[in-house]
Amino acid sequence: MSSLTLVEKYPQNKKSTIAIRPYFDERVDNMGLQKYGLSLFDGAFHEEPIACLDINGIRRYVTGLNEFAPDIKELSPDEQEAKIKQIRHVVSTLEKELAANVIDPSDENFWNKVKLLKPDNGEFWDRIKVRCGNEPVYLEPLTDPYDLIRLYAIDAGGFSIVARSLEEARKMSVPPKFYLDKLEETASVNTEVKKMRNKALAELQKLFDKNQNKLLYVAKVLDPNSAQYKKSTPNDIIYDNMDKYINGDLIEKDKRKTAERFLDAAALNMESLKIKAIVKDSSYYKFIATKADGFIYHMQTVTMLGRTLVDVAEYLKNPLNEEILIDLTKKVEKYWNQ
C-alpha cells in the first residue's frame, strides 16, 4: 500500500487559473509585512496536513470526498443525491489513475472496493498537505490528481490556513494566511468592490456639483474628525477628504465598507443627516455626555437621551423633544459658523 500513498511535490512551473495565494489585510498588523503585500517573511513557508477530526474515537478527514460526512447529510435529498454522485465520480477517477483500480460509481459496494481514498485511510490522507509561501501555488486539477484532491479538501475547509475564497477570507474574524483564488470568482469579488466604489465616487461628484450643503453633513457623519468641518470649509477640501474616505485612505481601510457607508449617508434625507451631524458634534463638544449609568444625557437639562448616539438621533427626531434639538442645534451651529 505504501507505493500508492506517495504524494507528489508541487511542480513550481504550474500556471493555471486556480491558485493558493497569500492573504493580507492592510487593517491588521502582521509584523509590518502587510505594508509590503506579504503574508510571511521572505523564504518562509507554511505547511499543513489535511484536517482530521476525532469524534468519539472515530477519525474523520475533511476531504470533501466523503459521502458520509455530516455536511452531506444536511443537504436536501436531491442535493444529497447529486453530491454523492459527484463524489463517487471523482473518487472512481482518482482510484483508476492512482491505484489502477477500476470501480463503477453506481456499484452498491462502491466504498468496499475503494483501495486508496477510503475515508479512514490515514496512511494516504495524512500525506496530503499544502505548502504555501509568498508566491502563489498553482493548482491544475484537470491534469494533476493530487491538485484535484487538494482542491476538494480546500473547498470542504480541510486546511485551516487556506480560506475557500477571497470573499470568505475578507469575512473571517481572524484573517487566514492564504486563500483559494479561482480567477473568475476572485475577479467577480474585486469587480463588485470596484463597482461599489465607482458608484460612491459618482455620488460624491453629484453632491459636489449640485448639493454642497448636503455634502458637508455627509462628511460630518462619516469622518471621525467631524469637528474639523465648518460651513466655511472649502468644498474642495471636503471633496478631497471624502474621496480619500471612499478609497479607504482614512481610518477605515475596507473599500467595500467605505463605499457602502458613503452611499447610505448620501441616501439619507437632509433632516436625518443634519440630526446625525448635530448629535456627533454635540458629543464632541460635550453638550451631551455619557454618565456612570451608561446612558447619554443632555448636560444642560440632565435629560436622558439613550445609550448610543443612534438612540439620541432617534430621540431628537420625535417632535416632543424639539426643545432639546433646538438647543443642541444652536450650540453646534456656533462652531459651524466660525
Image: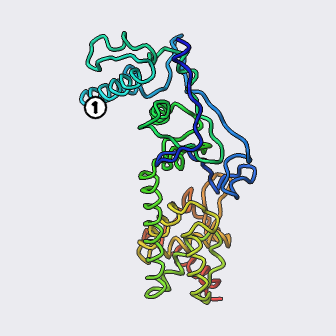
**Please, is residue 104 above or below residue 228 in the view?**
above
Q: Which residue is mark 1?
A: 79
For the point 32% across and 17% down, the residue is 103
* 4 sits left or right of 292 in the view: left
User: Which is nearer the eye, 224 or 255?
Assistant: 255
Count up the numbered dots. Answer: 1
Q: Which residue ends up furthest to the left in the rendered image?
A: 78
**Please, is residue 147 above or below residue 183 in the view?**
above
**Please, is residue 180 above or below residue 129 in the view?**
below
Q: Position of residue 85 (x, y in %)?
A: 29, 26
* 54 sits left or right of 145 in the view: right
Q: Position of residue 18 (x, y in %)?
A: 48, 45
Q: In which image quadrant can residue 83 be found?
A: top left
Q: Is residue 163 visible?
A: yes
Q: Position of residue 278 (x, y in %)?
A: 56, 74
Task: Identify the colour scheme used.
Answer: rainbow
Q: Is residue 174 visible?
A: no
Classify mark 1: residues with Cα within 10 Å, few (<14), some (14-19) or many (20+): few
User: Which is nearer the eye, 31 or 229?
Assistant: 31
* 266 sits left or right of 237 in the view: left
Q: In which image quadrant can residue 283 be found?
A: bottom right
Q: Give the structural element (helix, strand or loop) at label 1.
A: helix
For the point 62% across and 51% down, the residue is 24
User: Which is nearer the eye, 262 or 270?
Assistant: 262
Identify the image quadrant of the C terminus.
bottom right
For the point 32% across and 29% down, the residue is 86
Disc 1 residue type (three-letter):
Glu
